[in-house]
Image (cartoon, rainbow, N blue to C red):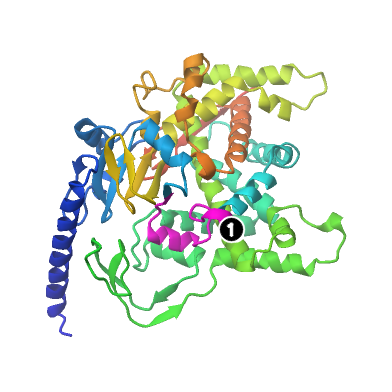
């Protein structure tokens, strides 16, 4: 084929697809869907949707559409018709009726990276079994006796390594802390050693690609992530040409799937084992070699439990552990610097928080080591308000993609089967009808009865059967880190760097802070 003909063919295909798509969208807009704006041809409102904004604000995409159409509206995102909900009752309905009315709506490239059997996309018995593994393995009894002591030790070593009046990046330090806990408790990898640090770097690459544009171009974040975290089929020469928007009337070849990209394929070969897979497999082989040794020499970790107590294949165990570590690493490590950011801007909350932890130390008999006990943890009332409730209200950035399993009628609208539904949890957390002065950091709002009444619509960890099974583990890790921080240091935010939603919450500069050592009585 002549190179000069290729652009013409691409243009013709694009025009045909756009024409078919918009005919289909016009038909569907008149079928009872919520009002909305389809945006630009092909891209819809995707650019506006992805535009970064402070996590404690709605962002221009939500503000513009809510002001025009209300809390439930229709748009076009990434080539698909989508209903976006900032409505507390609809979001509650979505999360409480998973698999009955709604299924997962993760993009195909994300499913390819995490695997068809991953917990976020698994269905029915497969999902229930995976969820039961996490809930039982990280139950309260194990959190108290098994996680808490190690979390205390890792936090002590990490935070005591900071030099007085030095500048640290809060995001980096929290990532070291959370990854070391997960690596030890899932794979029995020692904190801070070169092997563990190398694996942490690979997970960073994997997560960076998971939330990037799916461009299989050498050097792109997506391309790098596939090579460190996912085994997949790839070609020696793949070129992303254009995004595909289609309707059910458009016929696509077997190489191009709905909502994906048009790609030129050449010779295809199988990727080699990835670095993350190889590391987990190596640990599994070591366990097999230890069969028959005394129980005292066996590691107490999730890998050992899965090998002994589940019927999963090695490939399934690798997928499960990779996704568990990635999920815990991504969420918890991002929340800790958000707490540091808001406390750095609210001295009153910091002092009250510090006093609560000092009281727990003073209340112990002489000779106590000052470590956090399980009883202390359960009675840190204001800490819960600051570290969990108010911080996650302002910094979770939660938007859950779902697919309607059937035609759904709600408040006079019809959400058709197969339609993408974006449950914007963060928009509910910033709803002025639910929270007074919603963009302000005010942990005291959770101490009165009105704050407690809002817990029905407070869902930073999701809800229903899809609620994050590691929520209690995450809370414990965050509180342990913050306790050691506030009892040992004051800090100063040294440059403008607020939590940004793009699309998950992050800090563009890693939240640099200057720490000053404390001498507390």
User: In the rendered view of the protein, which quadrant contains the N terminus?
Assistant: bottom left
Where, by quadrant of the figure, is residue 498 drawn?
Answer: top left
Can residue 497 be seen in this snapshot? no
Taking depth in this image into account, of 519 and 412 the one nearest to the observer is: 412
Q: Give the left or right position of residue 501, taking residue 359 as reference.
A: left
Give the percent coordinates (x, y) of residue 118.
Answer: 53, 57
Q: Which residue is mark 1?
A: 320
The residue segment tinted magenta is: 103-126
Residue 209 visible in the displayed image: yes
Residue at figure coordinates x 51%, y 63% from the top left: 229
Q: Tell me which corner region of the image, top left, top right, bottom left or bottom right, holds residue 517.
A: top right
Give the residue at the far right of this rendering.
Answer: 294
Residue 275 located within the stretch drawn in magenta: no
Apparent side of residue 76 relative to residue 273 in the rendered image (left or right): left
Which percent across, then down, holds residue 452? 51, 20
Residue 423 image offset from top left, x and y in percent? 37, 41
**Where 448 falls versus 291 (above or below)?**
above
Q: Which image quarter holds the C terminus?
A: top right
Residue 113 part of the magenta segment: yes
Q: Toward the viewer: 428 or 266?
A: 428
Identify the residue shown where x is 32% and y is 41%: 409
Question: Which residue does the image show at 51% across and 55% down from the upper left?
Answer: 123
Is 29 displayed left or right of 158 in the figure?
Answer: left
């Amino acid at each position: 084929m002549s190179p000069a003909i290729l652009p013409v063919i691409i243009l013709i295909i694009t025009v045909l697809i756009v024409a078919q798509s918009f005919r289909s969208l016009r038909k569907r807009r008149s079928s009872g869907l919520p009002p909305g704006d389809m945006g630009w041809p092909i891209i819809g409102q995707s650019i506006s949707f992805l535009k970064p904004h402070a996590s404690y604000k709605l962002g221009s995409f939500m503000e513009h559409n809510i002001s025009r159409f209300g809390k439930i509206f229709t748009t076009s995102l990434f080539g698909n018709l989508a209903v976006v909900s900032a409505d507390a009752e609809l979001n509650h309905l979505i999360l409480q009726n998973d698999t009955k009315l709604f299924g997962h709506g993760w993009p195909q490239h994300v499913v390819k990276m995490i695997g068809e059997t991953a917990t976020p996309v698994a269905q029915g018995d497969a999902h229930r079994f995976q969820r039961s593994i996490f809930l039982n393995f990280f139950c309260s009894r194990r959190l108290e006796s098994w996680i808490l002591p190690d979390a205390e030790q890792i936090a002590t070593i990490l935070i005591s390594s900071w030099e007085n009046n030095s500048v640290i990046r809060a995001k980096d330090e929290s990532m070291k802390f959370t990854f070391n806990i997960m690596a030890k408790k899932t794979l029995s990898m020692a904190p801070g050693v070169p092997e563990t640090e190398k694996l942490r770097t690979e997970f960073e690459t994997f997560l960076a690609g998971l939330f990037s544009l799916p461009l299989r171009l050498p050097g792109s974040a997506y391309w790098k992530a596939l090579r460190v975290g996912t085994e997949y089929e790839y070609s020696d020469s793949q070129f992303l040409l254009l995004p595909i928007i289609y309707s059910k009337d458009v016929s696509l070849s077997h190489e191009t799937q709905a909502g994906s990209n048009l790609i030129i394929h050449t010779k295809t070969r199988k990727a080699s084992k990835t670095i993350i897979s190889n590391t987990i497999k190596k640990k599994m082989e070591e366990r097999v070699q230890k069969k028959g040794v005394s129980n005292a020499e066996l590691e107490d970790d999730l890998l050992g439990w899965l090998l002994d107590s589940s019927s999963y294949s090695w490939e399934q165990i690798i997928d499960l552990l990779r996704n568990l570590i990635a999920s815990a690493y991504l969420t918890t490590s991002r929340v800790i610097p958000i707490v540091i950011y808001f406390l750095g801007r609210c001295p009153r909350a910091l002092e009250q928080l510090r006093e609560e932890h000092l009281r727990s130390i003073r209340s112990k008999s002489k000779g106590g080591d000052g470590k956090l006990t399980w009883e202390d943890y359960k009675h840190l009332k204001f800490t819960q308000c600051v570290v969990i409730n108010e911080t996650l209200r302002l910094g979770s950035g939660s938007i859950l993609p779902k697919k309607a399993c059937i035609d759904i009628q709600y408040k006079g609208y019809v959400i058709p089967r197969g339609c993408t539904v974006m449950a914007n949890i963060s928009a509910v957390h910033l709803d002025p009808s639910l929270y007074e002065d919603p963009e302000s950091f005010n942990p005291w709002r959770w101490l009165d009865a009105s704050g407690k009444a809002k817990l029905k619509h407070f869902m930073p960890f999701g809800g229903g059967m899809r609620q994050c099974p590691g929520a209690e583990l995450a809370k414990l890790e965050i509180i342990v880190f913050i306790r050691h921080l506030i009892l040992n240091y004051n800090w100063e935010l040294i440059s403008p760097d607020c939590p940004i939603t793009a699309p998950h919450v992050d800090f563009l500069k890693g939240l640099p802070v200057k720490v000053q050592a404390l001498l507390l009585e």
